[in-house]
Image (spheres, rainbow, N blue to C red):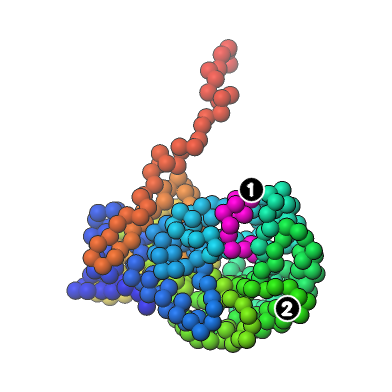
Amino acid sequence: MHHFQVRNGEMHCEGVPLRKIARDVGTPVYVYSHATLAHHYRVFDEAFGGIPHIVCFSMKSNSNGSVIRTFTGLGSGVDIVSGGELERALAAGAPPSKIVYSGVGKKAPEIEEALNRGILMFNVESREELETIDSVAGRMRKRAPIAIRVNPDVDPKTHPYISTGLKKNKFGIRIGQALKDYEWAAGRRHIEIVGVDCHIGSQLTDVAPFVDAAGRVRRLVDRLLRKGLHIRFVDIGGGLGIRYNDELPPDPKAYADAVTEAFRGLPVTLVLEPGRVLVGNAGILLTEVLYTKPIPSPAGKGKKHFFIVDAAMNDLARPSLYGSYHAVLPVGKPRRGKVTADVVGPICESGDFLAKDRVMPPCRGGDLLAVMSAGAYGFSMSSNYNTRPRAAEVMVSGNRFEVVRRRETVRDLVRGERTASFLSRRRTGKG
């Protein structure tokens, strides 16, 4: 469900015409629907109403402060993967007691800052990381709350780049080794074992891999409890998929029912890390067609078209990176007919595309297009390749909208640069 709808031949976000946003803010621009964000959070949270739980929004999917603030205002915590995300989460009102710190490469200063802030727990990804956390906590004379992220070797049946629960992935510790690491941690003065963590991947459209992983984690938790370890939290990660094209992901209630059954009867609180499912369909990338270019079809029948737009792979990397599908819809009334087109950007790479071989209405320069389902891993993965300033971000609520991140300028991009002193010296002598 989302609040991007066509009214009187014009696409709106809630009560605001997208054409007005493009006119006032410029393009490319990310547009988020506050009502959609809030609705998705409430539906997800209520789905787990029958079991103690904490929802921690996975902010790597979208780190805009207003997006995070929307969720923390509804009671959400935050799942972070860097020291920078810790600062963003706190600035957006996340209580430290609802922040979990994931990620395979935590640095000692980041661990120290998280301990100073009093976060809920670290999701530990390796024995060496566990030893580093123990060392840092010892220097600080603190006890660090930890959960070990176990790798259950479950195939999530998703794109290999976003699969995280197979033994060949870099994430987590295999269950057999995790038992030994828990025993080691139990003997450390500066480690407090509080939970178990497991996350198998992203954009999952079937509950079966979740159920398989949950069953393996349940068996591990039972063994840890029998050993006398006080497991209070079971973090089952996120990964629930959304509809980009023809996918049919389970709704949050079906997902919740399937997962919670595995932990029924345990004296634990579930920690959930939804990301894409909350923000994916709540955002679009609005872009303007600059030029159109027809070419003969490779098959020798008819023409293929390039619609060259002002958004590019630096703005939305997913199509180039994963071959991902995003619907591309006209903002105004579509022209009659259909053509086969690649929607491409200005970047000097043949891999710079938002859609390939897409059957869609004809376009002309000046037309506006909405790249749908771009709220997750859109702006957060964007870059400045080709010295392109990153897009603005806008949030809509009802009939009003605000810029929640201004468009970058080239001056912003070069602010931290300086010319090396040896290059600025005036050359002397002949030749």
Residue 49 vertical position relative to residue 366 in the rendered view, above or below? below
Quadrant location, the N terminus: bottom left
Is 33 left, or right, of 210 in this rendering? left
Residue type at mark 2: give it. Leu
Examine the structure image and report whether residue 262 is included in the region drawn in magenta. no
- Decide: few, some or many residues near mark 1? Use Cα within 10 Å; few <14, some 14-19, many ≥20: few
Quarter of the image where one finds residue 273: bottom right
Q: Which residue is mark 1?
A: 109
Residue 159 vertical position relative to residue 106 in the rendered view, above or below? below
Residue 264 vertical position relative to residue 179 in the rendered view, above or below? below
SS for dot 2? helix
- In the rendered structure, which segment of residues is drawn in magenta? 112-123
Viewer-closest of 379 and 279: 279
Q: Residue at x 29, y 57 (%)?
A: 402
Quarter of the image where one finds residue 231: bottom right
Residue type at mark 1: give it. Pro
Residue 310: x %, y % from top left: 36, 55
Which comes sooner in the sequence, label 2 or label 1?
1
Q: Residue at x 55, y 17 (%)?
A: 427
Numbered tag placed on residue 371 in the rendering: none
Residue 144: x %, y % from top left: 67, 59
Is 319 left, or right, of 21 in this rendering? right
Residue 250: x %, y % from top left: 49, 84
Q: Which residue is mark 2?
A: 225
Specify whether residue 366 is in view: no
- Given contact means CB atoms under 8 Å apart, are the residues at marks 2 and 1 in contact? no
Q: Residue at x 68, y 49 (%)?
A: 140
- Decide: few, some or many residues near mark 2? Use Cα within 10 Å; few <14, some 14-19, many ≥20: few
Say which of marks 2 and 1 sits in front: 2
| Mark 2 to mark 1 CA distance (whole Å) | 32 Å
Q: Residue at x 27, y 70 (%)?
A: 14
